[in-house]
Image: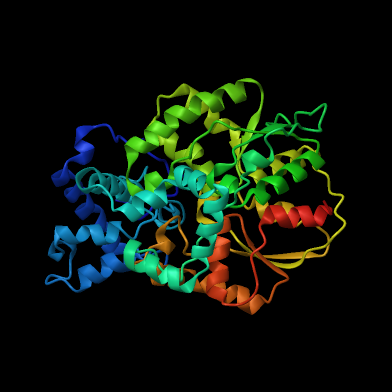
């Protein structure tokens, strides 16, 4: 038997429609098997709180082995996993094709799905995962003003913590009455003759995502300006629904399937017209690149969308490789502390954000490859917020030590979470905004 593997990790499809997937006895047996392997290795202890929770349960048990841990306590480990995938892709030596076949994140997903099927979810978790509906409702002009006022009221936030379990100190994003789709409702591209380059068509349909549409439409504006400056034609996808990453993290796989059935025909029709798709949020891109294809391995339309959706800086890097990226930067950015989000790192595309920003003259980028601790809805929940701040502290400390001109993350919520922990008047600047500044747009 080999210790570890030199072969590239492979991912098995998620057989979530098989009744065995929800068999509690079979699930517990697999949890015990994998937990025992993790207990014997402990290589992932620094990644998130799932592993310290597991190891504490083992060490405090009567046997000091996994067989001494009550199966009812397994869910304590599961609840701390936010499906970042770093253990699978960066740490675990026993992932497939190793014969031990350890896929910790997708085993946690199975346990989450089992929990959701048997017990449902509390109102808070349903609300936090309904990003489309909540964003549309809170984006109504008068309601948006009231919601934002509540978000910034210490007294009201304490009330929310008591009633809903949303931590009073957690960052909650503002909601905009003028969403990106409203702002660009009559937008037409200024690029008359887009040119293909390598694997890119030079025509990009922007999947705004729930966050980009309802919370920070300025990101969509920045993306359009940058792409148009580089003679890439752009348009907005307008009839889409949520990518469903929040529902995946909740274990609500039926809702994931429903949104997929809505989105894929729309996306597929777009790429059939020779448009590529770009989204500004790494988690949303990852859903179409990895999670949905593994849930629906036989869907040919989805497989085509998987190949046609890109991170913005991945797209720009592909254009740069073909000498189709403009480098007419007129503003240096100085020193940047750049946090690479987990859901961008596991896309296996390299550090494309750093690669592009490094083209800006007199710009020094320190990349921080460690979890910021926000992790979807994890950091806003009362029971997990303090732990999320602890997870992000090494990133925050590096930023403090660097004293950069800017600190930045492709995940805007991670950026705001870091700002929350820095406890200063500074604010994160998204990489798209940094690139726009460098171009002088």
Q: Residue furthest front?
A: 142
| Residue 359 makes an appearance in the image | no
Query: As rendered, which of 193 and 314 lies closer to the eye?
Result: 193
Query: As rendered, which of 321 and 300 lies closer to the eye?
Result: 300
- 284 relative to 83, above or below: above
- 269 relative to 119, above or below: above
Q: Give the residue displayed 48% in from the left and 46% down from the top.
A: 137
Percent across and percent down for residue 192 are 83, 27
How many numbered discs, if any? 0
Query: As rendered, which of 363 and 198 lies closer to the eye?
Result: 363
Q: Quadrant of residue 272?
A: top right
| Residue 1 makes an appearance in the image | yes
Q: Give the left or right position of residue 367, taking residue 116 as reference.
A: right
Q: Quadrant of residue 293?
A: top left
Query: As rendered, which of 436 and 308 lies closer to the eye?
Result: 436
- 299 relative to 186, above or below: above
Q: Give the residue displayed 31% in from the left and 51% down from the top.
A: 108
Percent across and percent down for residue 40 are 27, 63
- 129 relative to 230, above or below: below
Q: Give the left or right position of residue 301, taking residue 3 as reference.
A: right
Q: Give the residue displayed 47% in from the left and 73% down from the top.
A: 154
Percent across and percent down for residue 422 are 57, 75
């Amino acid at each position: 038997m080999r210790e570890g593997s030199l072969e590239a990790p492979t991912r098995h499809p998620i057989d979530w429609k098989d009744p065995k997937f929800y068999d509690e006895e079979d699930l517990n047996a697999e949890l015990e098997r994998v937990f025992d392997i993790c207990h014997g290795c402990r290589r992932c202890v620094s990644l998130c709180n799932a592993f310290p929770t597991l190891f504490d349960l083992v060490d405090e048990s009567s046997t000091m082995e996994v067989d001494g841990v009550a199966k009812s306590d397994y869910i304590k480990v599961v609840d701390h996993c936010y499906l970042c995938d770093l253990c699978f892709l960066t740490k675990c030596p026993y992932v497939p094709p190793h014969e031990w076949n350890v896929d910790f994140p997708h085993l946690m997903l199975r346990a989450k799905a089992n929990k959701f099927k048997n017990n449902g979810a509390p109102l808070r978790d349903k609300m936090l995962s309904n990003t489309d509906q909540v964003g549309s409702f809170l984006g109504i002009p008068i309601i948006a003003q009231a919601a934002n006022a509540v978000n910034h009221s210490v007294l009201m936030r304490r009330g929310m913590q008591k009633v809903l379990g949303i931590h009073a100190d957690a960052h909650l994003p503002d909601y905009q009455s003028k969403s990106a789709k409203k702002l660009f409702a009559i937008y037409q591209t200024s690029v008359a003759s887009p040119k293909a380059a390598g694997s890119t068509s030079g025509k990009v349909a922007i999947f705004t995502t729930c966050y980009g549409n309802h919370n920070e439409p300025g990101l969509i504006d920045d993306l359009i300006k940058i792409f148009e400056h580089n003679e890439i034609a752009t348009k907005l996808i307008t009839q889409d629904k949520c990518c469903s990453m929040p529902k995946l993290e909740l274990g609500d796989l039926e809702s994931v399937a429903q949104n997929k059935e809505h989105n894929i025909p729309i996306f597929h029709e777009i790429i059939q017209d020779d448009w590529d798709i770009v989204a500004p949020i790494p988690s949303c891109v990852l859903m179409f690149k990895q999670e949905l294809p593994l849930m629906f391995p036989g869907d040919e339309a989805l497989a085509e969308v998987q190949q046609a959706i890109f991170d913005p800086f991945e797209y720009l890097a592909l254009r740069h490789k073909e000498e189709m990226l403009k480098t007419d930067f007129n503003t240096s950015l100085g020193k940047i502390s750049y946090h690479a989000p987990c859901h961008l790192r596991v896309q296996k595309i390299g550090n494309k954000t750093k690669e592009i920003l490094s083209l800006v003259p007199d710009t020094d980028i320190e990349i921080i490859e460690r979890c910021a601790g926000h992790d979807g809805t994890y950091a806003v929940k009362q029971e997990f917020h303090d732990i999320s701040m602890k997870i992000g502290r090494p990133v925050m400390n590096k930023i403090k030590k660097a004293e950069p001109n800017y600190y930045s993350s492709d995940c805007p919520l991670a950026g705001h979470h870091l700002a929350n922990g820095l406890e200063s008047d500074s604010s994160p600047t998204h990489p798209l905004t940094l690139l726009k500044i460098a171009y002088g747009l």
